[in-house]
């Protein structure tokens, strides 16, 4: 199945057909698709008028450097700020992780968005793309905060998506720009990068996003193209039964598979349930390449649909939300 990108703040005529194409499960929105909440609600309504109420709408709303909707939404700090609190007050940091997640999720649910690609479960070990987006360098600390964050997302009525499996934080290169190779052993990855993901699984996270990183000690293909990582390790060894989602097929590190069709096929053959085609210039090729989804993939992807959420008016009239927002945004200073 596909999650596709659209061009702007309103649907273009040719994009209508994309929404009803077989295998298209939803739309991922970016800053280019947003001006304010009123516009977002109108866009969401126009999409679902065409594609139906079960059609997914998603966004990257992590906080810090990756927050696509800013005007009218709470300005969320990067997760690393919460990790810094943990170093002096672990109990306070765990509360802040849950509150950050609840604020993020409840605001999106009140705005017609099903889920965010959050939280980042990578370790904060200097990767150019991850940076402040990860909680902490210590896997035990990161795991505690991931568990709390998933709990907060669920309280906000939203599914959790852990990224980027099996861990993007311990290799320096940004996979948006180039191929990244992590030469460590599987045992080293298990002892470090996998631990926050295991905490997220224990908190019942519904999905994982795969890394485009190559771990040659395990497989010569990027993790999102690897049955070894998805079928053998993630599914069989770790027992994860939720949705497996690719990272964007337009990223430079995805190019090892070939063209757009080859990238789509490689992800699906490896075991991904949902493939991201984030840029409009690749959507038609991706749609042409997508086969009919399996029933099990449909079920896994359906679990990403948001629960009934609060209205925006009820959020604004909620003193507990005011308390959470004040505590979370204080980390921006």
Image (cartoon, rainbow, N blue to C red):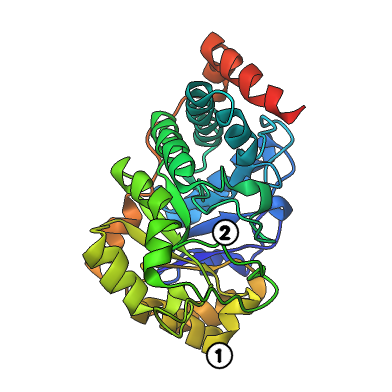
Q: Is residue 163 left or right of residue 271?
A: right
Relative placement, left or right, of 331 versus 190 is right
Query: Residue 164, image x and y in percent?
Result: 50, 60
Crowding at dot 2, Cα within 10 Å, few <14 / some 14-19 / many 20+, comes out as: many
- The one of 238 and 38 positioned closer to us in this rendering: 238
Disc 2 to disc 1, C-alpha distance: 25 Å
Quarter location, residue 189: bottom left
Residue occupying image coordinates x 35% and y 81%:
269
Question: How many residues crowd mark 1 within 10 Å: few (<14), some (14–19), many (20+)?
Answer: few
Find disc 1 in the rendering and name its residue. 258
In which quarter of the view is residue 249 placed? bottom right
Q: Earlier in the sequence, mark 2 or mark 1?
A: 2
| Placement of the C terminus among the 4 image quadrants | top right
Q: Is residue 320 above or below residue 186?
A: above
In the image, taking residue 154 as reference, residue 121 lies left or right, namely: right
Residue designated by label 2 = 169
Q: Residue furthest right?
A: 333
Compared with 296, 198 (above or below) is: above
Find residue 80 and report its image quarter: top right
What is the tally of numbered marks visible in this picture?
2
Residue 67 visible in image: no
Is residue 123 shown to the viewer in this render? yes
Identify the mark at residue 267; answer none if there is no mark.
none
Callout 2 secondary element: loop
Q: Nearer the viewer, mark 2 or mark 1?
A: 2
């Amino acid at each position: 199945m596909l999650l596709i990108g659209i061009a702007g703040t309103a649907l273009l005529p040719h994009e209508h057909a994309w929404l009803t194409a077989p295998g298209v499960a939803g739309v991922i929105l970016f800053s280019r698709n947003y001006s304010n909440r009123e516009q977002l609600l109108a866009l969401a309504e126009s999409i679902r008028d065409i594609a139906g109420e079960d059609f997914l709408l998603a966004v990257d709303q992590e906080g810090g450097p990756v927050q696509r909707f800013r005007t009218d939404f709470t300005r969320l700090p990067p997760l690393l700020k919460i990790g810094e609190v943990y170093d002096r007050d672990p109990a306070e940091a765990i509360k802040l992780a849950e509150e950050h997640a609840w604020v993020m999720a409840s605001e999106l649910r009140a705005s017609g968005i099903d889920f965010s690609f959050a939280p980042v479960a990578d370790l904060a070990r200097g990767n150019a793309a991850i940076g402040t987006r990860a909680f902490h360098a210590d896997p035990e600390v990161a795991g505690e905060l991931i568990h709390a964050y998933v709990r907060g997302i669920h309280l906000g009525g939203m599914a959790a998506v852990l990224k980027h499996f099996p861990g993007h934080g311990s290799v320096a290169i940004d996979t948006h720009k180039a191929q990244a190779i992590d030469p460590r052993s599987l045992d080293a990855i298990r002892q470090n990068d996998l631990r926050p993901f295991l905490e997220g699984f224990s908190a019942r996270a519904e999905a994982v996003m795969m890394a485009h990183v190559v771990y040659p000690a395990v497989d010569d293909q990027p993790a999102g193209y690897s049955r070894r990582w998805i079928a053998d390790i993630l599914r069989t060894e770790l027992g994860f039964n939720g949705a497996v989602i690719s990272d964007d097929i337009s990223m430079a590190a995805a190019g090892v598979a070939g063209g757009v069709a080859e990238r789509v096929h490689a992800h699906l053959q490896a075991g991904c349930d949902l493939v991201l085609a984030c840029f409009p210039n690749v959507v038609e090729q991706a749609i042409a390449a997508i086969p009919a989804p399996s029933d099990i993939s449909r079920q896994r992807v359906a679990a990403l649909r948001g629960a009934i959420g609060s209205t925006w008016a009820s959020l604004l009239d909620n003193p507990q939300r005011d308390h959470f927002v004040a505590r979370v945004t204080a980390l921006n200073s």
